[in-house]
Amino acid sequence: MTKITYIEHDGTSHTVDAPEGLSVMEAAIRNMVPGIDADCGGACACATCHVYVDGDWAGKTGERSSMEESMLDFATDVRDTSRLSCQIKVTAELDGLTVHLPEHQG
Amino acid sequence: MTQSPLSGPFGTVIIGAGQAGLSAATELRKRGYQDPITLIGDEASLPYQRPPLSKAYLSGDLTLDRLWLKPEAFYEKSQIEVLTNTRVTTLDRARQLVITKDGREIAYDYLILATGGTARRIPIPGADLMGVHVLRDLIEADGLSAALDQARHVAIIGAGYIGLEVAASARKRGLDVTVIEAAERPMARTASALLGGWFGAIHRGYGVDLRVNTPVEAIVGDDKAEGVRIAGGEVITADLVLMATGLTPNTQLAESAGLSCNDGIEVDDSARTDDPLIYAIGDVANLPSARYGRSLRLESVHNAIEQGKAAAASIMGEAVNYDPVPWFWSDQYELKLQITGLIEGADQRVRRGDPEEGRFALFHFKDGRLIACEAVNAPQEYIAAQRMIAQDKRPDPEALRDVTVAMKTFLA
Ligand SMILES: Cc1cc2nc3c(=O)[nH]c(=O)nc-3n(C[C@H](O)[C@H](O)[C@H](O)COP(=O)(O)OP(=O)(O)OC[C@H]3O[C@@H](n4cnc5c(N)ncnc54)[C@H](O)[C@@H]3O)c2cc1C
Ligand code: FES
């Protein structure tokens, strides 16, 4: 199990045990973390699973794919640290990962 | 389950525990709705995603535990009572209650019909033979998947999205696949000629035997399907037949209760039927679109979610005006197709990017207004188009054609 912490826009924090192989989005949905809608269920088609990856982790969560990049281009409040959480796979390496959630999805 | 109290509040009863019904229930709670919510579904399982049933779930890349839309604990936490395996057989509007197959009466203050649809079986000889499948729900997907494990020759009737997605999954499994389509090209009902033709060529390239302009006459076989007889008499050998021939909206309850139905249950722009206490959402609803100047019945996850939210907002007393820019996606082989808007009535079309490179977008205009975009592995074009359509923009077609002009410029 990999520990992942999601911090809502208002500062509320949720730490969950995420099984390897799922996506960071799926781990949030299974643990009822509010603030991730994931309308398309992880098909990289809706951009409602937007998160910000804390600086130090960016190297470990991997690169955005070109598809993800484009989806993010038009999401609200995009930053350099923005990712679509359905495109980040949970691995042992990510133990302790912290992501912040935007105020709105979409 | 507690017996219905004799006096209210009875809360909101939702018939159909699918994508739309769940969305309405979730949104009601998000907005602070305090009364009971009962989500009634006739399937055995809690709400799940249907799109993977013809894609990653069918090809074995996604396991069952990843299909659920919400974990079981969510329903208790959100105080949404879910009745699975429960079919509603009667809607009694005068008494404001519904009756389940096992005779239980459940009263409502508001009712939401989210009953989706049933895969259509075309009425030809042999349609009921063993080995003839349809695909709408999890049980049918499991049945199809198990049959694919045994099959060698697959015949798919209908080259719509589901037919083509299953064709791609079956090719991935190494099976012989024939797709038989009555129209002159794949996806003829919803996609442009250029896109449909292009997808047809892709499937042929992957080894699918695609037959267009080919009506089907019968499914042949003694007690089990052995082939499909097409117009002209040829029999295409098949030990597995999939009828991917569209959806019939589940309007029976609404119809027998006297609600207006016409290719779905008719609703207004707040998802309300002609009974002010009853809403209809998702695949079963037929909604008026000012944007497209006609009524529409949409079959997409996006519409199921958003119309569900609209109904919830309306129940909470908010004025809503739901007039969506439709969108959905389809995965076939390594291709991601994304379509936004509706192409009907288009009088001008431009292409951006090169189909030879497997990455392009088609923009469709009507009277200078952008009305639709079909994008293959071109998410940026797709998203920008979606925004432009929502804002009634009139981008310069020649600039759109020019790949050196960034999509962002059109939204400035
Ligand atoms: C194989 C497949 C692939 C798809 N791929 C995509 C895709 O890639 N992208 C996309 O956007 N959309 C896709 N769709 C469409 C999408 O899944 C639907 O638009 C969406 O599920 C509609 O949701 P709904 O809630 O309206 O209906 P449903 O999800 O069908 O839910 C309706 C539920 O109501 C139940 N019900 C009906 N009558 C009664 C009754 N009397 N009593 C109790 N329960 C009842 C039904 O059994 C069902 O469980 C796909 C659909 C299928 C089948
Ligand atoms: S869940 Fe839709 S893009 Fe991530």
Image: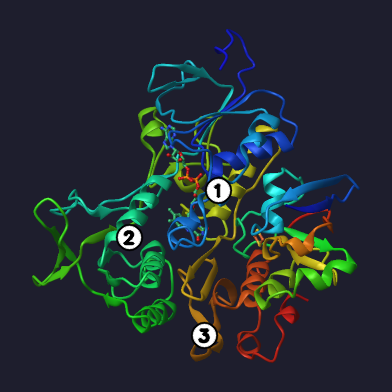
Could one spot residue B311 in this view of the protein? no
Could one spot residue B204 in this view of the protein? yes
As measured in the structure, the alpha-carbon distance from the residue carrying label 1 to the one carrying label 2 is 21 Å
Q: Is residue B198 above or below residue B117?
A: below
Residue drawn at 66 percent across, 79 percent down: B395
Occupied quadrant, residue B369: bottom right
Residue behind mark 1: B65
Question: CB atoms at circles 1 and 2 under 8 Å apart?
Answer: no
Q: Which circle marks residue B358 in the picture? A: 3
Q: Is residue B263 above or below residue B278?
A: below
As measured in the structure, the alpha-carbon distance from the residue carrying label 2 to the one carrying label 3 is 31 Å
- Label 2 is placed on what type of residue? Asp
Question: CB atoms at circles 2 and 3 under 8 Å apart?
Answer: no
As measured in the structure, the alpha-carbon distance from the residue carrying label 1 to the one carrying label 3 is 33 Å
- The mark nearer the N terminus, 1 or 3, is 1
Residue sitting at the far top: B6
Q: Is residue B400 above or below residue B75?
A: below
Q: Nearer the viewer, residue A24 or B388?
A: A24
Residue behind mark 2: B149
> Mark 1 falls within which chain?
B
Specify whether B118 is left or right of B219. right
> Mark 2 falls within which chain?
B
- Label 3 is placed on what type of residue? Gly
Specify whether B113 is left or right of A33. left
